[in-house]
Image: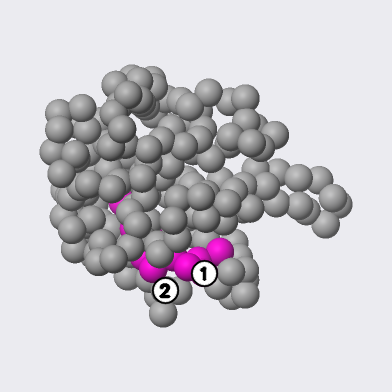
Amino acid sequence: MKRKNIPFKALESCIESYKEDFFVYLILDAAQVSNEALVFINECRDDTRIEFYSLFAGTTEGNAPFEVAPVLILIQDSTILNEERFNFIHKTWANEQALNIVFSPLELTQFVKKMKRYLTIEFPDQSQKIFRWFDPRILKKLNKILDNEQEHEFFNEIEKWIISIRNYHDVESNQLMILENT
């Protein structure tokens, strides 16, 4: 996985720059922005152009409400990002470390199945813990958590993964980290 940091770019600009023929997924760590996430999800729930999916659905954490789960949003039409109700997503992208953009050739069901495999990890003592890979603060350090083989498996069939790196001292110097399959 090749890593590079670039100056911060708006969400739409990132999507337009890298989407090519890939599916575009936003992964929101809703627990970091739970109140705003719930309002946003409720505003968009009836819009057939937007597909939301709790990555906890069907897991032992499956009873967790949307506002505390990692939420997957399939972006089929990037023009919807121009709508006012997406202000929350734009603010989260610019001001928080709670949103990921993923470009993958995998269709929604395949992508969800793949990513759910990594929600729980088993330790040598057979205890299981949640692996918060959907948290950009964790993701940017993934190369220090996983060995090369594990990292290759995790990013298999993912073309690019972009996270916003927040500079808490100077928002103007926020960056993006692009993880690119090589």
Identify the residue at image location x=76%, y=52%.
122
Q: Indicate the amino acid at tag 1.
A: Asn
Q: Is residue 25 left or right of residue 77?
A: right
Q: Nearer the viewer, residue 180 or 41?
A: 41
**Residue that protrudes farthest toward the front in the picture:** 48
Q: Is residue 50 left or right of residue 72?
A: left
Q: Look at mark 1 in the image and give the residue it sits on.
A: 156
Q: Position of residue 90 (x, y in %)?
A: 22, 38
**Residue that protrudes farthest toward the bottom in the picture:** 182
Q: Position of residue 107 (x, y in %)?
A: 44, 56
| Residue 141 lies within the magenta run | no
Q: Nearer the viewer, residue 31 or 109?
A: 109
Q: Which stretch is magenta?
A: 154-165
Q: Position of residue 4 (x, y in %)?
A: 32, 70
Q: How many other residues sit within 10 Å of disc 1, few (<14), some (14-19) or many (≥20)?
A: few
Q: Which mark is residue 22?
A: none
Q: Which mark is residue 181?
A: 2
Identify the residue at image location x=81%, y=45%.
127
Image quarter of the N terminus: bottom left
Q: How many other residues sit within 10 Å of disc 2, few (<14), some (14-19) or many (≥20)?
A: some
SS at circle 1: loop
